[in-house]
Image (tube, helix red, strand yellow):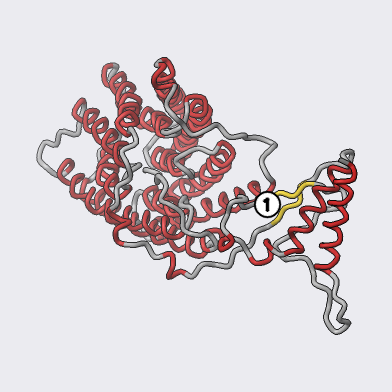
Amino acid sequence: MGATSRSGRTASQSAWNRSTRSDDPARPAVAPSPSVLLAPRAASVAIPLLPRHSPASERSPGAGSPASRSLVNYLRDRRRLHPSIPTRPVLLVETRPPVPLSHHVPRPQDLVAFAPHNESHWIALRAALSVGIPLAVLGLTDHMEWSLFAAFGAFTALFGRTDGYRRRLHTQLAAAAIQVGGVVVGTAVSAAGSGPWGLVLASALVAAIASLVGDGVGWHPVGPLFAVFAVATTAGVPATSTDLVPALGVSAGAAALSVVIGVAGALSPRRRRLPRRPLTAVGPGLPVVRVRGSTIRTGRYAFAVVLAGGVATAAGIGHPSWAMVAAVVPLAAADIPQGSVRAVQRVVGTGLGLVVAAALLLIPDPPVSGWGLIAVVVVLQSLAELFVGRNYGFAMVFITPLALTMSTMVTPLDPGSLLRDRGVETVIGAVIGLALTILSREHRGTAARPSAQPSAG
């Protein structure tokens, strides 16, 4: 055993020396590959950031060089010979050249493609119950002025839609805290009379916090979209300091109900046996490189929210929340093709959804009031969750009238200006979000991936 380790160490050292030494005095010694980050001498473990089975075409040239492979073998042998040496990771930073933008242009069929059903009817049922029950209770108690608090707390049900019950509980508890916090912060901003710029800054702050929490938990849908939606919408509704207690209580109650409904399927043995996404480790054990990436994403989300909300506010357009939400959507994508598909789908789907919303809001004696309003919200929420995981653009046909009807739940608004603002701000936010996605090195240097479930909102 010792002889084998010694000989392996000697071979790896010799290969390393050969790869970094040149007998030609006119030729400088070959430096280690720039894709390898050397750690202090106490380091003993090599951690490749790409999976071992990644094809050679996806790895950088330096990552597969004899020098880098010899270094990895040498450090592994050193660990076996000296187990008392402290363990520190050696990060092999796999650099990929930026992919040309022409390779990221989405295909037309991507805009109309539908993903498999994947039991979306159960997701839609959970969402309908999570939203419908709190709204029904408020209708029975004649407190529909708190309906926005209940609706945004119930958005907790939209997280962890395909996870196992243990992971879903973990995810939804974190999402509930963020959603309730967003409702309370938005109500406080409105009660303080901070104005539209205070709304924008509060939304950016909540977006940053939600991004960090979401990255730490690994929740899905990715990004702070629902948190931004909650704080920006509630901050735009007139409120006083006496509304803070109902905002906290009603949103927390709706979120708690959503969590209970989300894990209720665990009572069924058949549902427990279904394959789910595994629970991954969270906490201090996360690689350092993820912390840096999470910080960059957080700053990007906050900047997009401030920029989109600032443009809408400076232009004098009402409801900057829709511009901020639209800007977040492309940034939550894994790469530029997904981001561009989401941006286009959001704009086109919003345009079609405005037709549906106009039919609900502009007709004489519209049914969107009282119990009719509750029924419309529940039906639209169910349809949105039924299709959001299959085609984001088609789901926007239902999400758009849902957002507009929710905006009229507390304060009567002019339907014409509401429809116009929604359309204009969606375009502003989508353009800003897509531009930041294209400028992002993280997105440009990432190869196109299979389409993932987009965020709603």
Which quadrant does the N terminus fall into?
top right
For this rendering, which residue is in front, 391 or 32? 32
Residue at horizontal 46 percent and vertical 58 percent from the top: 448
Residue drawn at x 45%, y 43% is 228
Q: Tell me the amino acid under the disc marked 1.
A: Pro
Q: Is residue 215 visible?
A: yes
Provide the residue designation for mark 1: 48
Q: Position of residue 229 (x, y in %)?
A: 41, 42
* Left or right: 153 as drawn, with respect to 64: left
The image quadrant of residue 93 is bottom right
Q: Residues within 10 Å of mark 1 (few under 14, many from 20)?
A: some
Q: Which secondary structure lies at badge 1?
A: strand
Q: Is residue 137 above or below residue 67?
A: above
In the rendered structure, the answer to whether residue 53 lies left or right of residue 151 reads right
Q: Judge by depth and name the residue closer to the eye, 190 or 285.
A: 285
Q: Position of residue 172 (x, y in %)?
A: 48, 29
In the figure, 1 relative to 46: above or below? above
Residue 272 at x, y percent in the picture: 44, 21
Q: Residue at x 43, y 64 (%)?
A: 104
What is the x, y in percent for residue 18? 83, 67
Q: In the rendered image, is residue 246 in sight? A: no
Q: Is residue 372 left or right of residue 66?
A: left
Q: Residue at x 37, y 60 (%)?
A: 315
Quarter of the picture holding the C terminus: top left
